[in-house]
Image (cartoon, grey):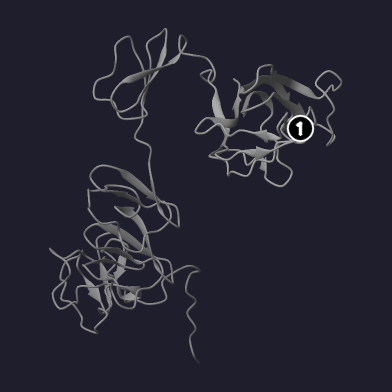
Amino acid sequence: MNKIVRMPRGGPVSAVPRATPAPPVPGQQDGDWMWDGTRWVCCSPCDDGSVPPFPFCPPPGFPPPGCPPWFSGQNSPPWYPGANAGVSFGATAPPNPVRGHFWWNGLTLFLFDGAVWVPVGGTSAGGNTPPSGTPPANPVPGQQWFNGTTLFVWDGNAWIPVSQTKTYIQATAPPAPNPGDTWWNGTQFFIWSGSAWDLVGPGATVGPTPTTALVFSLQQPANLTVGGASAWTIMPYTATPLVDTQGMWDAVQHKLTPKVPGYYFIEVRGGSDTGTGGIAILKNDPGTFGSVASSSNVIIGNGSSANGGWITAVGISQFNGTSDFFRVWGWSSDGIMSNVGSSPAVAAVIMP
């Protein structure tokens, strides 16, 4: 008869005790894995397929012996900065980068975004910007360039100079100012022109400096045929204006239409060699004119009482800059209006 011995519940099932595994020690390897004292890290081969001999982690220098100068992708050693994608050093970009790879060319830090290298630090990203006589090649928007004198920023199309001007608030004039610098001394405001502090105000002239400007001048070197015996006719000037800043002259209708609204001073001259005559300036005339006394369009009219002599008329009138115009009318008892030589037959000046 077989004898069955019942073991107590929860008791040992074997008389031979199970061994407890010894804990790993730093540097212990198991295949491609190594215990660094805290965790197991992967020590897979380098990109070229070689297995670097690293008895300790990290090795004393890098790149590790046997590895190429570039580290990228999953094969980057875990102790290397940027372990997930790699960090590279060199004058030219590393081959076969993966997204997240960093590359330092000695001047700029780049990050590979999966398609292109994007500058993230250093010169190209706007950090340290050493002087350079030539602008950087292939700039990106926001990139800065200092040529030793002026700081520029690339806006995507062109290098735009960054303003070097400053604003000073102090009692005394700032030393070594740049053109365009402004200075408030507590009482007055100045701007540096490049050679002197020009006063802006208060105390400077307010508004434009009052002045006049010649806008039209015409000389008539030849005599003109006009109506006789007080028969007023439009003066048939044939000369080309010497001055016509507004393009106001109509050579066909012999009228002048100011293009800028305002008050105008007008002077006209003529002559009558043997008889009497008259000259007048009319505003918006209907094309006919009887006499100075009977027309409301006359700005000014004049005549000579003696036989032979110069006839001059001057007047001031307001013009709207669009439709208002003026013309010169004249007559001479002998039907001839003498030329005035080098003097202007018609001149117009806009008033301040």
The residue indicated by pointer 1 is 228
Above or below for 26 versus 200? below
Q: Nearer the viewer, residue 73 or 27?
A: 73
SS class, disc 1? loop
- Can I make out residue 258 in this image? no
Which residue is located at x 51 percent, y 19 percent?
A: 209
4 to the left or right of 171: right
Which quadrant of the figure has residue 56?
Answer: bottom left
- Can I make out residue 78 in this image? yes
Residue 193 in percent (x, y) is at 34, 26
Residue 61 in percent (x, y) is at 13, 64
Q: Nearer the viewer, residue 276 or 122?
A: 276
Residue 51 in percent (x, y) is at 20, 80
90 to the left or right of 82: left
Which quadrant of the figure has residue 186?
Answer: top left
Above or below for 28 versus 304? below
Which residue is located at x 22 percent, y 52 percent?
A: 132
Which residue is located at x 42 percent, y 10 percent?
A: 188
Which quadrant of the figure has residue 78?
Answer: bottom left
Above or below for 60 versus 242? below
Question: For the residue marked with disc 1, what is the amino acid?
Answer: Gly
